[in-house]
Amino acid sequence: MRYPEHVIEEIREQSDIVSIISEYTALNKKGSSYVGLCPFHNEKTPSFSVSEDKQLYYCFGCGAGGNVITFLMQKENMSFFEVIKYLAEREHIKLDETYLSEEEIQNNKKRSQLLDILKESARYFHYSLRAPENEEALQYLTNRGLTMETIKHFGLGYASHHFNDLYQYLRQKGYSDQILLESGLFLQGKQNGNMIYDRFAGRIIYPIFDLSKKVIAFGGRVLDGSMPKYLNSPENILFNKSRNLYGMQLAKNSGASYFILVEGYMDVIAMHQAGFNQTVASLGTAFTPGHAKLLKRHTKEVVILYDSDGAGQKAALRAIPILRSEGLKVKVLLLQEGKDPDEYLKTHGYDAMHQLLEDAPSDMWFQIRTIEKKYDLTLPEEKVKFLQEIASVLAETSSSIEQAIYLKEISKTYDIDEEAFKAEMNRHYQTGIRKKALRENEVSPRQKKQVFNNEVIFLANLYHYPNLARHVQAYLKPEFFDEGLLYDLAKAILDALQSGKEIDMTYFTTHYPEVEEQNIISHVLIYKDQRYEDVALLQKMMTENVKRLNKQYIERRLKVTQDVNEVQNLLFQKKELDKLNIDYING
């Protein structure tokens, strides 16, 4: 364990699980809990529950469960240590380095050193852009319509065409070759004594920032038409291009009701300069689920504004389902005049662009119009194929309200009987259900619903039916359960039955941080099995489990004990076990 219990507990207590999970799925108050659609699997009826009191979540559909720490471990693929750091920063809790291992201390030092190198380099590039000998680079940016204020605002720069100017500059600052190579700013040749040279030499430089406005990478564009035209820093401990968006550090504070997703650096910069401060772009990679998750933390709606060429349309079609899967509302605007937003703004200005964005069609109509271009609707057989394809698209929509609205609109627009089109859509929906079932059967064991053993199910019922549990607690010991988590859960539940107090979650948070462990904990403390609402059935289940656990414990002890008196006592208990009659009077 990397941090003391009190530190982890302070972080957990100050991290509002309802607020954090609400960034991934809408939650509504229901009784003492919050419910919503599960963020771990697709569903139309909410089966996901969050307990604010216990600071736990549990899905009655797929079985995912845990606390705020394991939630982020599962959703963001973060380690326990990464989540603790993230939550500490979020809640402004200072972490003392004395709690860290030597390896973690060294990693933190390396991270800090890399950030210093990148900050120093960004300043160097920005200064170089203003140098008289690099006038061509500055002229390129001003010719693109950028003001000096915008250039400064985005920290734009230039890497000298000399092959190792930046390397020599940073070496003079005392940085080693090893850390400089890890920064991603340099390459090492295999000839000429393994010479190190600048990766971005001769390029316009676009610093890439994280959400806290620290430089974590760079993008570079050539001036001479050579290839590759654009080049990004390689991924390292600071930079993951699938989880960062260019301009996000500025867009997150825009206060806009929707974000604008464009394709490149210059589109972002031009849009910001024009007043659209909510504009972002992916970083030399296709749009990913990580990008969608990042957007969801800061907005509920995204307008895709890609180039109007074929590649732009295909990219938009790929991004739509990724954004929708995170519950984001999506619109698509393809500019007809001017290939990209930069060119359109120069010709038409802010007001025209703003109106187009406000009137942008929904992603559904964008898909319909795109599909329509493939068919000649004057031919009956072509129109049939067209309607079948858009029926399959509509069938994938999770909102029944949205389906009903588009059913009417599509039927009216394309002169098709509404009931006939609805039947076609339902046919595709049922086909999709079957395909989904097949896919779910093929997922890895880690993604499948966890199967709980009898002990876990029994402990859950002990916890949720305390009035009946008190009748059997005299026949139970924590030792009846496996050492570790089940032993501790049994002890905590039995102690709570005795004292009447609620279970203290601190111990279970700090001692059992793994996702699978927290899944068991949340199942026991949140999942109430409806099969046992029948009191007679519940009493029978409890009695049988008490006998089974006693018998298993006696048999285990008989195998290991060498104490004659204990052996005699155990044999007597085993003989009396079948006669055991638990009285549930007033239960």
Image (cartoon, helix red, strand yellow):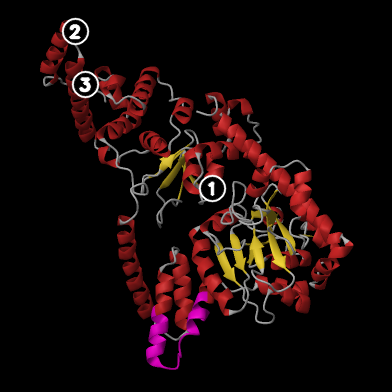
Image depth: mark 1 or mark 2 in front: 2
- Position of 342 with respect to 323 (left or right) is right
Evaluate whether residue 58 shows in this view: no
Q: What residue would you read off at disc 2?
A: 563
Image quadrant where residue 292 sits: bottom right
Q: Which tag is nearer the camera, tag 3 or tag 1?
A: 3
Where disc 3 sits, the SS reads helix
Given contact means CB atoms under 8 Å apart, are the residues at marks 3 and 2 in contact?
Answer: no
State whether residue 3 is above or below residue 575.
Answer: below
Tell which of 103 and 288 is nearer to you: 103
Three-letter amino acid code at disc 1? Ser
Q: Of the numbered discs in the image, which one, if any, rests on residue 91? A: none
Label placed on residue 553: 3
Span of residues in magenta = 367-388
- The mark that comes first in sequence, 3 or 1, is 1
Crowding at dot 2, Cα within 10 Å, few <14 / some 14-19 / many 20+, comes out as few
**Which is nearer the N-term, disc 3 or disc 2?**
3
CA gap, disc 3 to disc 2?
16 Å
In the depicted view, which residue is nearer to us: 585 or 480?
480
Residue positioned most to the right = 132
Near-viewer residue (148 or 351): 148
Amino acid under disc 3: Tyr
The kind of secondary structure element at disc 1 is: loop
Q: x%, y% of residue 470?
A: 30, 22
Label pair 1/2, CB-CB below 8 angstroms: no
| Residue 413 against residue 67 in the figure, above or below | below
Identify which residue, 186 or 33, lies in the foreground. Answer: 186
Q: Which residue is mark 1?
A: 22
